[in-house]
């Protein structure tokens, strides 16, 4: 597959100077990923002697897409996801053991639970300890993603939008003690980092490293997924005469870290560039997504770019109510199999709990089926069905998208409500995720549910979609 040629503002940004920082924010379907690939290729052109270039994303599935959607376009460009880059850098500096060294999420949660219990015994009357280990883990993740390195810095940190419960006054001291206890327990396990603080280790290592940088240019795709400390570490990974180009969509920010460009280490003297034209979605799908993004859960999203009306018209999205879960699965499988013979189809799910069911039911249906997963090795844009999560679909697109199980019992995810400690924050996170999933569809969008529809979709004007019952 060859990439489309840049037009208008895209072409201008493609040829921006090869020094300094550039931030591009665009609506879904505005060509950010395509331009990220083309910008990386331009900066790595040997004839221009521009130096080594890395194209980096957060999501491993998206890194696979970037690497394989047009192999010729990324020839000479290193395409990596952030954590592969971080592990490689720390390993090269002998700061990461050859095997292990990073706590898996389950171990991290277990150790935070132990740290919570140990600290609770010191302050048996403090109410802050009544929150679940999952909620405390979310608060510690916020500390790590922001790169907060001391109790004093945490005590004075601005309370911006984030996951976790509200922590004020003396309670911040308790939380910091839990954090320090967690770090001690982790060290006893012989583990140096977890996935939340490895970026801080990279940033600290760069601050002590005077050797020539491996990359002269870094291009970041889906940058809204990166925490501030991740972005600071990438800014530190290029020399002064190098460049960082950031492409992102604040409406798709799903990892809970509000980005300020100064906090992210990015200096944008030309100001933020905006891509407003939607080249992917039909008018009907774009209107449906915009209705969700205009709801109360998107209030206060920083730097959100409102899309211009797309040019292509199509059929309205379809919301299908099914009599029960079994009927819903049968309906989705039959639709995907029929569509997948001539079109690319994405079945996107809130989590992986039902993923195996769909993969097994689609086997033998006479259609190519592949799983969207971090270990996927290649991307094809031919007819067939891809099955994965909202997360794994980020940055991708399909002719048709099926979104099963958009019922209230699934969205918001009950586990995220517990972890975030605030139902409003859970709805805000879910709204962004659902926006991501909806905007993957080029021409056809079908959402299904049984039981009660998620509140996120109840407020959308019924004139924007068709409602069916099966």
Image (cartoon, rainbow, N blue to C red):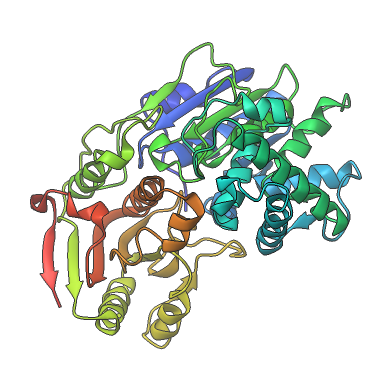
- Residue 174 sits in quarter: top right
Residue located at (47% from left, 50% from top): 421
- Answer with left or right where residue 98 lies relative to residue 404: right
Q: Is residue 227 above or below residue 273?
A: below
- Answer with left or right where residue 189 lies relative to residue 460: right
- Residue 4 sits in quarter: top left
Residue located at (57% from left, 30% from top): 169
Q: Position of residue 380 (x, y in %)?
A: 48, 62
Residue located at (68% from left, 31% from top): 148
Depth check: give the residue in front, 359 or 147.
147
Depth check: give the residue in front, 397 or 81.
81
Depth check: give the residue in front, 442 or 173.
173
Residue at the outermost top position: 269
Q: Position of residue 348 (x, y in %)?
A: 39, 64
- Residue 335 sits in quarter: bottom left
Q: Position of residue 88 (x, y in %)?
A: 79, 47
Residue at the outermost front position: 125
Task: For residue 368, say whether it is visible.
Answer: yes
Q: How many labels sit on residues? A: 0
């Amino acid at each position: 597959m060859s990439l489309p040629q840049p037009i208008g503002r895209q072409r201008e940004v493609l040829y921006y100077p090869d020094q300094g920082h550039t931030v591009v924010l665009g609506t879904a379907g505005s060509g950010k990923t395509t331009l990220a690939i083309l910008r990386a290729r331009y900066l790595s052109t040997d004839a221009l002697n521009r130096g080594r270039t890395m194209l980096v994303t957060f999501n491993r599935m998206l890194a696979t897409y970037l690497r394989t959607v047009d192999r010729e376009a990324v020839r000479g460009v290193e395409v990596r996801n952030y954590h592969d880059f971080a592990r490689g850098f720390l390993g090269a500096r002998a700061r990461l053991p050859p095997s292990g060294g990073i706590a898996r999420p389950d171990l991290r949660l277990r150790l935070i639970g132990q740290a919570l219990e140990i600290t609770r015994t010191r302050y048996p009357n403090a109410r802050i300890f009544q929150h679940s280990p999952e909620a405390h883990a979310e608060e510690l993740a916020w500390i790590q993603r922001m790169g907060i390195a001391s109790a004093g810095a945490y005590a004075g940190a601005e309370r911006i939008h984030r996951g976790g419960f509200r922590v004020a006054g003396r309670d911040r001291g308790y939380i910091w003690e839990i954090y320090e206890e967690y770090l001690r327990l982790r060290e006893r396990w012989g583990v140096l980092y977890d996935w939340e603080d490895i970026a801080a280790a990279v940033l600290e290592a760069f601050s002590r490293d005077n050797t020539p940088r491996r990359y002269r240019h870094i291009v970041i795709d889906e940058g809204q997924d990166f925490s501030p400390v991740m972005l600071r570490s990438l800014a530190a990974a290029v020399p002064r005469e190098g460049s960082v180009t950031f492409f992102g969509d604040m409406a798709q920010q799903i990892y809970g870290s509000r980005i300020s460009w100064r906090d992210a280490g990015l200096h944008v003297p030309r100001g933020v560039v905006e891509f407003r034209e939607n080249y992917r979605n039909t008018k009907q799908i774009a209107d449906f997504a915009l209705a969700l993004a205009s709801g109360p859960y998107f209030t206060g999203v920083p730097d959100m770019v409102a899309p211009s009306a797309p040019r292509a018209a199509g059929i309205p999205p379809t919301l299908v109510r099914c009599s029960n879960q079994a009927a819903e699965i049968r309906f989705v499988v039959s639709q995907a199999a029929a569509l997948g013979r001539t079109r690319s189809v994405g079945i996107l799910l809130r989590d992986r709990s039902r993923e195996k069911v769909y993969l097994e039911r689609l086997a033998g249906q006479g259609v190519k089926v592949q799983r969207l997963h971090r270990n996927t090795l290649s991307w094809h844009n031919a007819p067939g069905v891809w099955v994965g999560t909202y997360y794994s679909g980020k940055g991708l697109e399909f002719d048709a998208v099926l979104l099963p199980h958009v019922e209230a019992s699934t969205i918001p995810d009950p586990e995220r409500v517990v972890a975030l400690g605030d139902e409003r924050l859970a709805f805000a996170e879910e709204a962004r995720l659902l926006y991501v999933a909806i905007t993957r569809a080029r021409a056809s969008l079908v959402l299904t549910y049984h039981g009660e529809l998620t509140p996120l979709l109840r407020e959308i004007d019924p004139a924007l979609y068709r409602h069916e019952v099966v």
